[in-house]
Amino acid sequence: MAEFLPFISTVFIGLSAVFVAIGWYFIAKRNIEAHTKVMFWAAVLAVIFFATYLAKTFFIGSTSFGGPDNVAFYYQIFLVFHITMATIAAVLGIIQLTTGYKNKLKSHRRLGPLTSIIWFISATTGIAVYLLLYVIYDPGETTNLFRAIIG
């Protein structure tokens, strides 16, 4: 179970990014109705990701980096970058959902491209973190969140 939930959460954030890309396509084609529906599902998938991530973190713990010591420092820098991008993406995503549904299209259009790019960076680096923690290297010990981040 300790490795299943991270896999599932990674699938959901990857799917969320795919839906954001599809939403971007629809808005470029001026298909607002399809854009709205697809972006709604991108948000739902992101919430499912976050719920599975939180469930794993609270009930099982966080996985520390199990790779070689000479890679650990670079992994930690990469992880902090990912966490920063994910936090920014979440905040911007909430803003975008709010401005879109409230029909505040000037700010929605202005922030849309930036939000999407940061979302893609966040999803891509999140998938890379999963691969580094569970696929490329053997998982490290299960510990608390802060120890898993700082080593």
Image (cartoon, grey):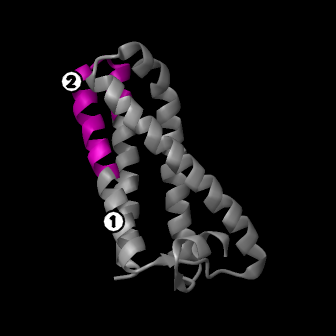
Figure quadrant of residue 41:
top left
Give x and y (percent) for residue 65: 61, 77
Q: Which mark is residue 33?
A: 2
Is 33 magenta? The answer is yes
Q: Residue at x 38, y 30 (%)?
A: 96
Circle 1 sits in a helix, a strand or a loop, which is it?
helix
Describe residue 48's horizontal placement relative to residue 139 as left or right: left
Read off the residue under disc 1: 52
Residue 21 visible:
no
Q: Residue at x 45, y 78 (%)?
A: 61
Describe residue 106's horizontal placement relative to residue 30 as left or right: right
Tell me where the magenta segment starts and ends, as one range: 23-46
Viewer-side label of 2, 1: 1
Circle 2 sits in a helix, a strand or a loop, which is it?
helix
Q: Which mark is residue 13?
A: none
Q: Between residue 118 and residue 84, name the one nearer to us.
A: 84
Q: In this rendering, is residue 111 above or below 54?
A: above
**Residue that protrudes farthest toward the right in the picture:** 70
